[in-house]
Image: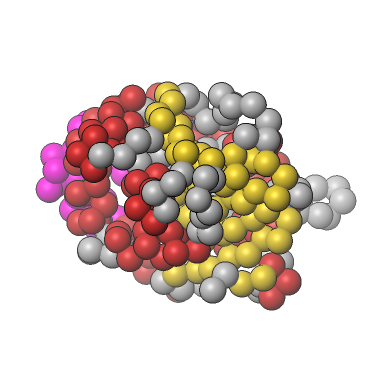
Amino acid sequence: MLEQSQQREPRQQPVHMEQPASKEPTFSANESARNDAFSGIWTKELNDVFAGIAKYYDTANHVASLGLWNWFKSSFIATIDVRPGDKVLDVCAGTMAVSIALLQKEPNLDVHAVDRSAEMLAVGTRKTKKLGIVITPEISDVHQLPYPDNTFDLVTIQYASRHLQVIDVFTEIERVLVPGGHFYHCDMLRPGNKIVEILYYTYLRACLNFTAFLFRSNPAAQNLKKYFIDALQMFYSAAELTSLLEDIGFKSVRSRSLLFGMIGIHKAMKA
Ligand SMILES: C[S@@+](CC[C@H](N)C(=O)[O-])C[C@H]1O[C@@H](n2cnc3c(N)ncnc32)[C@H](O)[C@@H]1O
């Protein structure tokens, strides 16, 4: 069950946020800080990483999550309400894990998958051909979605927001949703609890080292091991993400956390 936003933990100010004159937390200040820290990596190295690991991305996820990957994915898919005929956009679709799972849940959907990595989308397209299903791929940076206003009944994004300017991308998602349409978000989040956070980063460091060793990752991936932890440390908790979505204008924001807040699932509606 997703929690109602009214029932969420009290609104917290992210520890890394600057305090503006009004004393109100501003997510735009944190987004600027994230952009200053990571824009170089986001625009170049990260793309090389996904191009290099596309072939074994799905396997690496199973290994790194100690086999929990399918449970995370099915928990996310279970929260998504799809109706026959819905037009769906999977943002940062990668190898199309979410797009394919949605079509398996409801075969009568018009699913579009957008990602800037041709290599990741190509792996996804090969999977759809084997399964005999059709998903329309689009190669594009998602900070400007190549679709008209009010196009999709639902939009999903899984495991990508930490690598994006989220206010810009979520505003774009709101633009392309039809009024009353829903946005479903799933990502690794900053756990609210400090002890969980320390254990989480220790585990992630071990995972990144192990998968890099196991799959002899390309040099770009080796260099970015530190980035993956840094990006998470500067990202949002579930409660902060709820507030950010509400600030953008989404209504009826609900959230659910898995593994003590390490993974967060959000559902939000366009008014
Ligand atoms: C960790 S993968 C997640 C893929 C997929 N959603 C999943 O759940 O398996 C992140 C994806 O985001 C894409 N990505 C990152 N930044 C992007 C951007 N600015 N525009 C479009 N795609 C981007 C990458 O190419 C990659 O395929």
- 119 lies above or below 14: above
Is residue 222 at all visible to an observer of this figure?
no
Position of residue 98 in the picture relative to residue 209 (left or right): right
- Quarter of the image containing the N terminus? bottom right
Q: Which residues are magenta?
A: 205-225
- 58 lies above or below 115: below
- Whether 218 is among the magenta residues is yes
- Which residue sits at x=83%, y=55%? 23
Magenta stretch prevailing secondary structure: helix
- Which residue sits at x=26%, y=52%? 61
Q: Compare residues 50 and 139 and report the one nearer the observer.
A: 139
Toward which corner of the image does residue 204 lie, by quadrant?
bottom left
Q: Compare residues 63 and 224 and report the one nearer the observer.
A: 63
Is residue 3 at all visible to an observer of this figure?
yes
Position of residue 133 in the picture relative to residue 198 (left or right): left
- Whether 152 is among the magenta residues is no
Spot occupied by residue 221 in the image (x, y as percentages of width and height): 27, 36
